[in-house]
Amino acid sequence: MTDGASIIPLHAVSTYEYDALQDCWSWASPIPVLQYATDGSPLTTEQLLAFVHPDDREPTLAQFLGLLQDRTPYSCLYRLVDSAGVAHPVVNVGTPVVEGDEVTALRGFVVDLTAPLGAHARSAVAAMLPVGAVVDQATGALMLAFGVDAEIAYRLLTGYASRAGAPVHGLAADIVDGLASVPVTGPEVAEALIDLLESSVARIPLAEDVTPA
């Protein structure tokens, strides 16, 4: 098997959903380290924790249990270990799905932070963007909704665009336009962002030279 450290792309992002009633984690196009962990199959929380770095398991589990009691968007950092024993720092951002008085699911994204995103990379991408302002607005929306910093929000935006074979500024414009009718505060923003990203990707055809995950 290829060393997970060598196949992690610069902007690696995967959408996930956790069914709290069935204790089942599932991912769309898992990032490489998750692909190794899941083998394409859903996992229980206990099974997923087996791939979390030993030093991170207890605090990660504590955070997870807290998410099931909370009703606000969240972000948390931990490390996943690949088949070669290499630890990959990831950030999990998302929002709970509440039905009645119960959190029934979690929806969000996992972003692999293994490769540092330096100023050179940001400048190279920015130089290709004719509408920089809309990218800044979309990045800002992600930061506010999920409580992440600019680096992680930028990775999330560019990683999702890369997964879809879509231009970053096009995806950013979809986000900004879609949020125009959404309340500016509260969990509705996080839920709307997830839906906007998913719907944008679903309607953008993959380029011929892009191989679906």
Image (cartoon, rainbow, N blue to C red):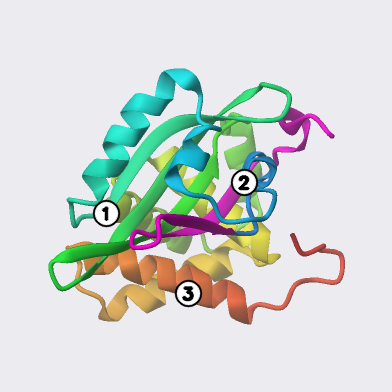
| Percent position of residue 126, x then y | 58, 49
| 212 vs 147, nearest the viewer | 212
Residue shown at 51% from the left, 77% from the top: 199
The numbered dot on residue 12 is 2
Residue shown at 26% from the left, 42% from the top: 65
**Numbered label tally:** 3
- Image quarter hosting the C terminus: bottom right
Q: Are marks 2 and 1 in contact (CB under 8 Å)?
A: no
Mark 3 is surrounded, within 10 Å at the Cα level, by few (under 14), some (14 to 19) or many (20 or more) other residues, namely some
At label 2, which amino acid type do we have? Ala
The numbered dot on residue 174 is 3
| 136 vs 84, nearest the viewer | 84
Q: CA separation, marks 2 and 1?
A: 21 Å
- Which one is in front in this view, the residue at disc 2 or the one at disc 3? 2
Q: Are marks 2 and 3 in contact (CB under 8 Å)?
A: no
Residue indicated by mark 1: 73
At label 3, which amino acid type do we have? Asp
